[in-house]
């Protein structure tokens, strides 16, 4: 189980840093690198769903302060915004 979780974290880290746009690679890759090790299984699954959202929407919500995102992802988006090191 632990090995499966670690492999899942590695896959999420890869997906976070290989998005297709350099900006989102940096933003989500940095966030994932810092936060995935501390996420539990439920948080990891939620982050996996979050990674399915489009780069333009994510960039708009994270960088411009647009709050048109779903309540479902509010916690992740606000956490990314508050931890901006990019």
Image (cartoon, rainbow, N blue to C red):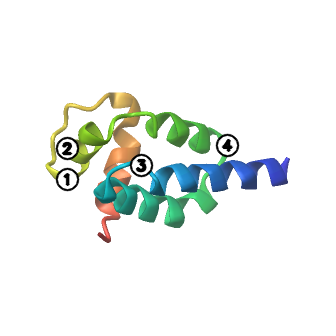
Task: From the image, state whether disc 2 or disc 4 is nearer to you.
Answer: 2
SS class, disc 3: loop
| Mark 2–mark 4 CB contact (< 8 Å) | no
Q: Which residue is mark 1?
A: 63
The percent position of residue 77, horizontal first and vertical second, equals 34, 46
Please say if the residues under marks 3 and 2 sit with CB atoms less than 8 Å apart.
no
Quick check: marks 2 and 1 in contact, CB under 8 Å? yes
Q: Residue at x 32, y 52 (%)?
A: 21
Residue at left 33%, top 29%?
A: 71
Instruction: Identify the mark at residue 46; answer none if there is no mark.
Output: none
Say the numbered circle drawn on residue 41. Answer: 4
Residue 3 is situated, as x and y percent measured from the top left of the image, at: 83, 54
Q: Which residue is mark 3?
A: 19
Place of residue 8 in the rendered image (x, y in percent of width and height, measured from the top left): 69, 48
The tag earlier along the polypeptide, 1 or 3, is 3
Comparing 85 with 7, the one in front is 7
Q: Nearer the viewer, residue 49 or 71?
A: 49
| Label 4: how many Cα within 10 Å (few below 14, some 14–19, many 20+) | few
Residue at the spot of label 2: 60
């Amino acid at each position: 189980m632990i090995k499966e979780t670690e492999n899942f974290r590695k896959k999420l880290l890869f997906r976070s840093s290989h998005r297709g746009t350099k900006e989102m690679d940096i933003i989500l890759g940095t966030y994932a690198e810092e936060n995935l090790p501390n996420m539990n299984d439920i948080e990891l699954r939620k982050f996996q769903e979050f990674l399915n959202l489009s780069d333009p929407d994510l960039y708009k919500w994270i960088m411009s302060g647009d709050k048109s995102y779903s309540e479902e992802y509010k916690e992740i988006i606000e956490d990314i915004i508050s931890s901006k090191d990019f």
